[in-house]
Image (cartoon, helix red, strand yellow):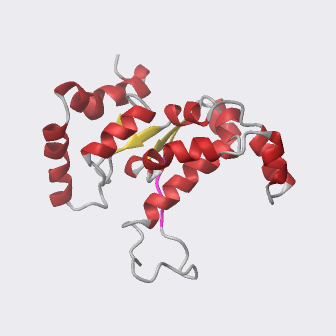
């Protein structure tokens, strides 16, 4: 499937969903969208990098909901802890398939993260927005998570962004960055 997406230079929106009812949920945080969605989004982004998918599919653009989950916060850990060196990879207790995929990751992890796009859905914290812009400059897009977020929540997003960002930063998130992602749509 990803090879087909590569052929079409697709833009892919990644949004988590709730697991099957048979999967045990955290006891005290059983509502998935509070924290599990962010962790699942982080896992998805890391899997795309570590599996070599982003290397094999350089023209596929991935947009991650909820500011990429915890990826902006974990960025330095993710890039430093990746088993880049062959002796380290060989010492890891994982399958040959995983080691082979890891070996196909050719660039610095930060390079792949900088190619990702991040949607503000349910996360307009100004510190997270600024951190995300550091790891992926001008790759933050306004998103409301509509139809899931109540209108009262959505109505708080725009003023929160406007009050904590410069006019240029706000306009980048509000419309300029999406125009850069889809350049042929605006002529």
Residue 97, percent across and down?
83, 51
The number of discs equals 0
Residue 104, quarter of the rendered image: top right
Magenta span contains residue 15:
yes
- Give the residue drawn at x 83%, y 53%: 91
Residue 65, percent across and down?
41, 50
Q: Point out the residue furthest to the top here.
A: 187
31 versus 27 height, above or below: above
Query: Is 159 situated left or right of 75 in this image?
Result: left
Query: Is 100 situated left or right of 3 in this image?
Result: right
Point out the stretch of residues depicted in magenta: 13-17
- Quadrant of image for the C terminus: top left
Magenta span dominant secondary structure: loop
Residue 52, quarter of the rendered image: top right
- Give the residue drawn at x 49%, y 60%: 39
Q: Who is closer to the viewer here, 178 or 168?
A: 168
15 versus 130 height, above or below: below
Query: Is 76 situated left or right of 149 in this image?
Result: right
Judge whether residue 131 can be spotted in this image.
yes
């Amino acid at each position: 499937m990803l090879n087909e997406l590569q052929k079409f230079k697709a833009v892919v929106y990644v949004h988590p969903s709730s697991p099957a009812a048979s999967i045990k949920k955290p006891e005290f945080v059983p509502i998935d969208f509070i924290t599990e969605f962010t962790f699942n989004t982080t896992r998805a982004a890391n899997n795309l990098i570590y599996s070599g998918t982003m290397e094999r599919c350089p023209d596929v653009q991935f947009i991650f909901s909820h500011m990429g989950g915890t990826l902006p916060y974990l960025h330095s850990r993710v890039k430093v802890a990746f088993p880049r060196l062959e002796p380290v990879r060989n010492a890891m207790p994982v399958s040959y398939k995983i080691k082979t995929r890891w070996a196909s990751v050719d660039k610095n992890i930060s390079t792949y993260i900088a190619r990702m796009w991040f949607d503000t859905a349910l996360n307009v914290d100004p510190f997270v927005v600024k951190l995300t812009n550091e790891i992926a400059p001008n790759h933050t897009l306004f998103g409301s998570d509509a139809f899931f977020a109540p209108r009262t929540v959505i109505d708080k997003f725009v003023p929160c962004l406007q009050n904590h960002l410069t006019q240029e930063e706000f306009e980048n998130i509000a419309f300029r960055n999406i125009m850069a992602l889809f350049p042929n749509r605006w002529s």
